[in-house]
Image: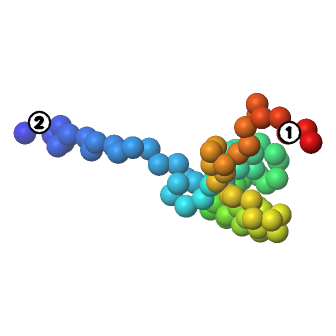
């Protein structure tokens, strides 16, 4: 054999870090903003995941206190923009 290996592994569908952590908030964007914002010289890999989880938790608490607003708002449930309130 000529030492070429057994072929490369086929990569699956890309998974975002938010998806891996089970979060809705964007971990990649938070990581970029932490690096760009001069908060520290270096930013670890777990820091943006933790921060995204904390921010998502706080947002969920605020939404819950706001009166039962759906966290993932379905387009069907939103009021139509073309509807005008009926005049009495």
Spatial CA distance of label 2 from label 1 is 80 Å
Residue designated by label 2: 2
Q: Is residue 62 left or right of residue 11?
A: right
Which residue is at 75% across, 50% downward?
34
> What residue do we see at 64% from left, 54% from top?
72
Q: How many marks?
A: 2
The percent position of residue 20, horizontal first and vertical second, equals: 51, 57
Is residue 35 visible from the viewing direction of this image? no
Quarter placement of the C terminus: top right
Q: Whole-percent x and y of residue 61?
A: 77, 68
88, 59: nearer the viewer: 88
Local secondary structure at mark 2? loop
- Dividing the picture into quadrants, the one containing residue 47 is bottom right
The residue at 18%/37% (across/down) is 4
Q: Is residue 25 above or below residue 61?
A: above
Q: Tell me where residue 37 appears, x and y as whole percent.
A: 81, 45
Disc 1 target residue: 86
Image quarter of residue 40: bottom right
Label 2 vs label 1, nearer the camera = 1
On screen, residue 80 versus residue 76, left or right, reads right
Q: Is residue 57 above or below residue 87?
A: below
Proximity of marks 2 and 1: CB atoms separated by less than 8 Å: no
Q: Residues within 10 Å of mark 1 (few under 14, many from 20)?
A: few
Q: Secondary structure at mark 1?
A: loop
What residue appears at the point 74 percent right and 43 percent down from the top-left corner? 79
Q: Residue 8, image x and y in percent?
A: 25, 41
The quadrant the N terminus occupies is top left
Q: Nearer the viewer, residue 80 or 54?
A: 80
Neighbour tally class for label 2: few under 14, some 14-19, many 20 plus, Cα within 10 Å:
few
Q: Say left or right for 7 vs 62.
A: left
């Amino acid at each position: 054999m000529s030492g070429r290996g057994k072929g490369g592994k086929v990569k699956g569908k890309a998974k975002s870090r938010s998806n891996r952590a089970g979060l809705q908030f964007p971990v990649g964007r938070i990581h970029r903003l932490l690096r760009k914002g001069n908060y520290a010289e270096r930013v670890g890999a777990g820091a943006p995941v933790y921060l995204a989880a904390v921010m998502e938790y706080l947002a969920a608490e605020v939404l819950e206190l706001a009166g039962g607003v759906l966290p993932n708002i379905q387009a069907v449930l939103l009021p139509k923009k073309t509807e005008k309130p009926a005049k009495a």
